[in-house]
Image: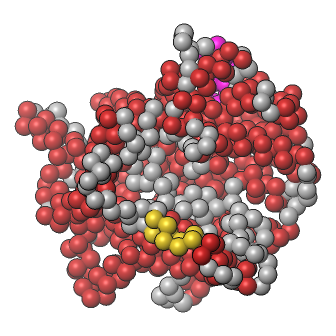
Amino acid sequence: MSEGSVLPAAAPAAVKAAGLAGSRPVAERTVTLRAFLLGLLMVAVIVAMTQALSIRQSAADVGGTAPPPAPTYLLFGYVLLAGPVLGRVSSRLALSRGELLLIYVMMLIAGPITHPIGMGFLLPHAAAPAYYISQEPGWQTFWPVLPAWLGPRDPGAVLEFYRGAKGPIPWHAWAAPMLAWSSLLIALFFVTLCLNVLLRKQYVEHERLSFPLTAIPLALAEGTGGVVRQHLFWLGLAIPLLVQGPTVLSRYIPSVPALQLREVLVLSAGETLSPPWNGLGDIYFSLIFWLIGIVYLVPKEIAFSAWFFYLLALAQNVTAVATGRSGETPNVYSNDFPALYAQGAGAAFALTGITLYAARHHLRAIWRKVFHNDHTVDDSGEFLSYRTALWGAIIGVVFLLSWFCAAGMRPWVAVLVLALILVYFFIFARLRAETGLGMGVVLWPKMLDEVMLTLVGARYLSLPDLTVLFSLRWLYFTPAVGSVMACQLEGLKLADSGGLRGRTVGWVLAAAAAATVLLAFVATLRTYYGSGFELLPVGRRAVNMVASQSFWSYSNLLAAHAAPRGADWGGIFAIAVGAAVTCLLSWLRINFLGFPLHPVGYLAANSWGMHLHWMTFLIGWLIKALVTRYGGLKLYRHLLPLFLGMIVGDMVHQGVWGLVAWATGGVQ
């Protein structure tokens, strides 16, 4: 634990602990030109795969979730097939470990940006006002204050976007929106990269966060002499393929029996039980093999806390019904007791403060280096100098605030909104670094527009304030954009473990994000105009979140403006309770060795997603608890390849059956 830290030190990287990867000294290397160019090529491949597999057809996720499917199985495919062949032809042709990891990181960053709930969400969200205004007369309320450069205004261009274009794409209609939104995203991603550089040493060297998701590429990048030569790895890889394969196959051959393992509704308490037990709501069972593998890698107290606090949340719901505060299962987004997601927001804010407090000595050292040129502070091992990172973050923040204000926000509102966005991005990057939890497992707790309406109230927000806030909703409603910061942080850890050194690494990560933004914008526009947004699976408003929320964002804007209220003190109290519980848990973990509850688990349980995945956490925790109790560290290390194989096998399963679904026009 670093000096003065209020956060308990996490276990070192699991893969290193097991001696599978990253445990031997690695020669320092700089970025090679071929790795950078191949990385850009693979960024384009990820963009193209997303268009084909995830947007044109909902056949498979490509790179948005954690762990990312396509980067994982593409790396596995190279190590298993292409690498040995190239090595036999010439040792110079084969990619080094550092090159493989750099290319993987560039794909890792590209995945969430080009995702259907990333760039695929931005474009219909920007086009929605011009399309629906003829159907929704009330939208005339905000139309005059909505900047014309945030979305297309040409009626013909908008209609073709939704229904398909017979002629060329009307690029002129999207020129201003493309410039505006691309500049916003590139600046935002550079700010997050700079913040990650500033905190990398604190996370990696002082607090020694576990970064469990890095175990997979680190192990695979060892090549055929690493984990892939171990029998337990192949056994683990076979488990998800054999267990899940028949379920997918049954969609093509109905006579094959299906075994449903994901999001199985086992109890609908609201319909089957009487009060107060109807407060339990819907209880789901999910068994996700890659998540069991991740849970095996993280500290036991985090896995235990995730499912324990979920069950505690259910108990709070039952209490709400029993005390007459609710007649049915309380809405998790509501500010009425127990206001679970408001508690989650408070946990996120408190953890941000705790993290920064723990890093105070490190941050003071950065200040001395930048403003007093303190030679005792060494930043030679960082991927950007502290001076570049700090001033880059400052200039980027000024640009983002200027963008918000140019769109119509008052300065104090812009500062608060940007601060909330960065807090969520920041703490969920930390969450992924410590637990491996990211997009696909947990999302945000309370949405940021709801936090703004809770803390400030629509009464004190002008119509332009609200219009810009809800125009940005695509950015903070889903975790895709926020996941980029987590991917960058993971990328810095991988680069460091892979022996890559030099400032070039930081600029390569920045270039990967910028290139993806531009490629994804153009590619997604082509897809939507070529097929018609409404005619694609992602554009079906009745069943798809992207289409429905592109509409509801602006409807919610109207609702907030039509019935303006002040601050919601019930919600503020719930946020304060969440922050207080988080601080108490942190204090208890510091002062009582072995205290089993972790504040990160409390945050995860009070965010969207744990209601679907709690059982997988329980099973994974139970497996690890039994292994470590009866077999100790020796058995834990011995079985590690089995669980790494389960993770890779699940990614391969998604890739193989996603390709089948794409080829047959089906949905995985």
533 vs 57, left or right, is right
Q: Which of 167 and 183 is in front in this view?
A: 167
Using the rendered view, name the quadrant where residue 475 is placed.
top right
Using the rendered view, name the quadrant where residue 163 is placed.
top right
Give residue 165's position: percent from left, percent from top. Answer: 56, 16
Secondary structure character of the magenta stretch overall:
helix
Give residue 21's position: percent from left, percent from top. Answer: 25, 60
Q: What residue do we see at 26% from left, 53% from top? A: 255
642 vs 267, left or right, is left
Does 175 appear in magenta? yes
158 vs 57, left or right, is right
Q: What residue do we see at 68% from left, 66% from top? A: 332
Which residues, given as a range, are shown in magenta? 171-185
Q: What residue do we see at 40% from left, 32% from top? A: 52
Note whether 664 is above or below 613 in the view shown: above
The answer to whether residue 65 is visible is: yes
